[in-house]
Amino acid sequence: MLFNYTQFLLESVLKVNDDFLRIINIMKSWNYIAQIISSKLINKDINTKYNYLKIDKPSKSVKFMQDTQVARKIDSGLTDADLFKQANNTTNIGRLVRSLLADNNTEIPDRDLEVFVHEFNSLLQLFGYGDTSIKVVEGEDIRYWYLEERYVPQGTLKNSCMRYERCQAYFDIYCQNPEVCKMIIKVNNDGQLEARALLWKTDKGWYIDRVYYAVQAYESLIQSWGILNIENCSTGSLGRCEIQLKGSEYRAYPYMDTFMYLDTNSNKLLNWEPDLSEDIYYLQSTVGEYEKMDRIYSEWYDEMISREYAVWSDMVSSYLHTDNSVWSDYHNDYLPDSRAVWSDVTESYLWFRNTVTVLVGDNKTDNYPASDSKYEYVTDHDGVNYSKEYAEEILFEFDDELWSKEYWILVKNIKESSIEKARDLFNNSDISRLAEVDASVFRIELEDEEPEVIAILYYFREVYKNADRLKLAELVEKADVSEEVRKEKARLDKLIAKLI
């Protein structure tokens, strides 16, 4: 009997040891292969030749037990701990992962697997597998490792605004406070910096600041190394916290990612914006300077803003930032730019809730003050607003209402003496009424009666649906009518053409 390869694969629950699982859990935040392994393979019933995976410390390879042996050993009474101890076959992480994925119908590009293997092997350093390249430095070593000539010029490292030679004088605040400021670094075998992160001693414990890296995998590597190796160390959000410095006056200041407020009275760095005080330095300059805090609270933004760039708005009863506000000549006040609309008719910004949209030309609108007799507009039967000038061009009055010539037309019944002519002309046996402009052009008599208003769409269906438009166009060209009638006919034809 012949067997397929897959018939030799047994469905088993894949077991891995704690270190293997920890590395996968770290990597899954950015690597999709690690996500697959975590969510679809580990501790799942899968097809596999490998089981009881663990990392071999001397060789940095993976030890495993052949899955064909697992069921027999469990039946003999061995525990998971026993099976991990007996897992002595060796393979490398790349071969293992490719096999696990392939046996479970998942293919991955070679390049993606190479990246996974590189990142996995880098993370082995967290757990003492091989020589570590991560360490903590302080004092003048921080200045030394900030210089870009010592970087691997990739990733966020190469984009750091503090990497230049001119920035070396900015780091006194780091170098002169070694009790509370250190730096975690990762250096490759060539002595080049691959990642760095400031390490701060706050009133809540040690904190790892933003990680600058050559390869994204090093971000989690640095953070995890710090958490595992430094007591009471954290990363991410801390809430409000502070750092006690020896002093506050330095020859220059670096750009601070997190602790950007320096209280010069208490010599403390803060990660939250304090109450208004002239003794607070704001440290987010890329040229070694600081901004002296002269700030005021804005109800509108619910935050402090620079007094230098603050303007008062009566409309919102709050200070606004000049970058996010506009002056309104009409209201004689500042308005939040998110709540202001421009008005051509007033040549000013208007408060958005006090405006109406008004048609001022073909497909052209403007914002008018909602209640101001100086800027009049009219409203048609459909509730659309028009400037008085455009209304004279586009609206007609009927039955004490205004109607748009774009959508409505007045019609009358055709006289009995002209009905056959109209039916022949428009190739329409059902025709019974006509607009005055068509009657004038085609010499068709209408009843002397009050007109009726109907939609242009219905007029097209009643009159023009079967008409020979080329024939009608020739008649229009020959018609002996006034220029005003000819223009009105051209406008009507244009509207009807849109409906065809």
Image (spheres, rainbow, N blue to C red):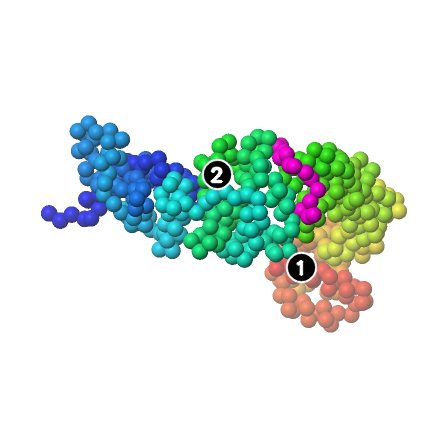
Residue 498 visible in the displayed image: yes
Q: Position of residue 65 (x, y in %)?
A: 23, 40
Q: Classify residue 302 as left or right of residue 19.
A: right
Cβ atoms at labels 1 and 2 below 8 Å apart: no
Q: Residues within 10 Å of mark 1 (few under 14, many from 20)?
A: some
Vertical position of residue 352 compared to residue 428: above or below:
above
Q: Position of residue 84 (x, y in %)?
A: 26, 35
The stretch in magenta equals 239-254
Residue 298 visible in the displayed image: no
Q: Residue at x 75, y 69 (%)?
A: 479
SS majority, magenta: loop
Q: Classify residue 94 as left or right of residue 178.
A: left
The answer to whether residue 338 is magenta is no
Q: Residue at x 38, y 40 (%)?
A: 127
Can you identify the residue that label 1 sits on? 496
- Of the residues shown, which amino acid type is indicated by label 2? Gly
Q: Residue at x 10, y 47 (%)?
A: 1
Q: Position of residue 329 (x, y in %)?
A: 85, 47
Can you identify the residue that label 2 sits on? 226
